[in-house]
Image (spheres, rainbow, N blue to C red):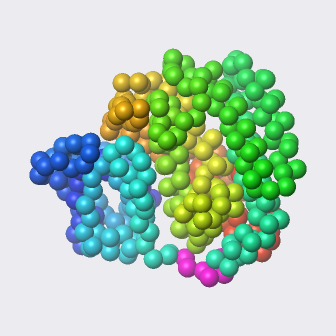
Amino acid sequence: MRQNLYLFSNSILRRKNNTLYLEAIENKERKDEADIDEDEIDAVLIGKKDKEKAIKKKFVPAQNVESVFTFGEIRFTSQFLGCLAEYFIPLHTFNYYGKYLGSFFPKEEINSGNIVLAQAEKYFDSDKRLFIAKSFIKGASENSLSNLKYYSYRGVGLTEEIEKITKLKDTIDSANSVGSLMGTEGNIKNIYYECWKKIFRQEVEFEKRVKNPPDNMINSLISFGNMMMYSVCLNEIYRTGLVPSIGYLHSTGDNRLPLSYDLAEIFKPVITDKVIFRVINLEIIKESDFEKKGNFIFLNEKAKRKFTEEFEERMRTTILHPTLKRNVSYKTLVRLECYNLINFLKEDKAYESFKYS
C-alpha cells in the first residue's frame, strides 16, 4: 500500500533510478525568514513502523509513495519532478509556518473532457449548482452535529447548541442562493466553534475562529489541519479526474481550487476536528508546542510532526459504509465522494454527501 511521505527538514530532493533520493541541505546560510538551520533530514513515511529520524540521506521507492508533503525549504531537481510524474505522485508544499504554498500535479492520471464539460454544465445551471452546494452543507452540518452529540452523550452540556444547529440545518433546503446558503453555513460554524471550549479538557484560549493570522493554538491547529484536509481532497480530485478549479459552494474565480474546499467541508468535522480534539484532550500537543511571531501563532516542527501522524492515523481508520456494507477508511470515503459526485455530474444519478452515523 502506498504511504504519504512527509518532509519536515530543509532538503534537496532528487531521483535515483526509481527511488526518491532525499538529501539534507548542508550549507549553513540563512534558509528563509524563520532562520531554520538544520543539517539533518527528517523524512517519514507515515504508517510505516520503522520510522527513521535524523538521517542525512534517504532512499524511498517511488512505487511506495502516495503523495509528498514538504515543510520548510525544499529544493527539487527536474529529474525528481519527472519521477513524481511517472508514478503519478502529487506534491504539496507548505512553508515553515504551515501555510499552504501550492501543489505539483503530474499530467492527469485520468483526463476526461466529459467530466470537465459536466462540471461546467452543472456550475452554470443555477438550480443544480445550488443543489450540490446544499448537499455539501448538509453533510458538513450533520457531521458537525455528530461530533457534538458524541460529547453530549458523554456528559458535556451541549443540548442547547445542538438544538440551535439542528434548526439552522433544517433551513438549508429553503435557501434560494449560494450566498444565503453560505450565510447559514457561517452561523452553524459559529455555534459549532463555541462548543469547543466545553469539549476540551485542557484550559485553552479559544473564543472564535480567527484565520488570518491564527491568534491562538486552537486557531493555529484548525488552519494547519484544514490545509491538510484540502490537500487530501486535492489528491482524490486528481485521482478521479475531477477539475479542482470548478466548485459549487465556493465560487469559481474566487478561489483557485474551490472544489477541494467544497469537499473538505464534508470531511473536516470527522477528520480534522476529531484529530484536534484528540491531540488537545490527550495532551499530545500542548501550548509549549507553538511559536509566536507578532500576533501569529504557529506549530513548531515537533508539533507538525505529531499532528500529521495523528491525521494519517485518522485517515486510515475504517468505518462501516452505509451503502457498501463493508468497512472502508476515511481516505477511501473521500475518493468515493468524488465518484458519487461524478455520477451525478455525468449521469444525473442521485447525489447525497457523506454523513457520519
Magenta segment includes 235: no
The single residue placed furthest to the front in the displayed view is: 294
Residue located 45% across and 77% down the image? 107
Residue 155 is situated, as x and y percent measured from the top left of the image, at 70, 17
Q: How many marks?
A: 0
Residue located 80% across and 31% down the image? 164
Residue 243 is situated, as x and y percent measured from the top left of the image, at 59, 70
* Depth check, front residue: 329 or 25: 25
Residue 47 is situated, as x and y percent measured from the top left of the image, at 41, 47
Query: Is 355 drawn above or below residue 286 in the view shown?
Result: below
Evaluate whether residue 303 shows in this view: no
Span shown in magenta: 110-115
Tell me the quadrant of the picture where the C terminus can be found: top right
The single residue placed furthest to the bottom in the displayed view is: 113
Tell me the quadrant of the picture where the N terminus can be found: bottom left
Evaluate whether residue 149 shows in this view: yes
Residue located 76% across and 43% down the image? 184
Q: Is residue 162 left or right of residue 209?
A: right
Query: Is 7 drawn above or below residue 338 in the view shown?
Result: above
Residue 205 is situated, as x and y percent measured from the top left of the image, at 51, 22
* Depth check, front residue: 151 or 203: 203
Magenta segment includes 111: yes
Residue located 73% across and 75% down the image? 121
Q: Is residue 162 left or right of residue 269?
A: right
The single residue placed furthest to the right in the displayed view is: 174
* Depth check, front residue: 130 or 238: 130
Query: Is 121 drawn above or below residue 56 in the view shown?
Result: below
Q: Is residue 275 left or right of residue 259?
A: left
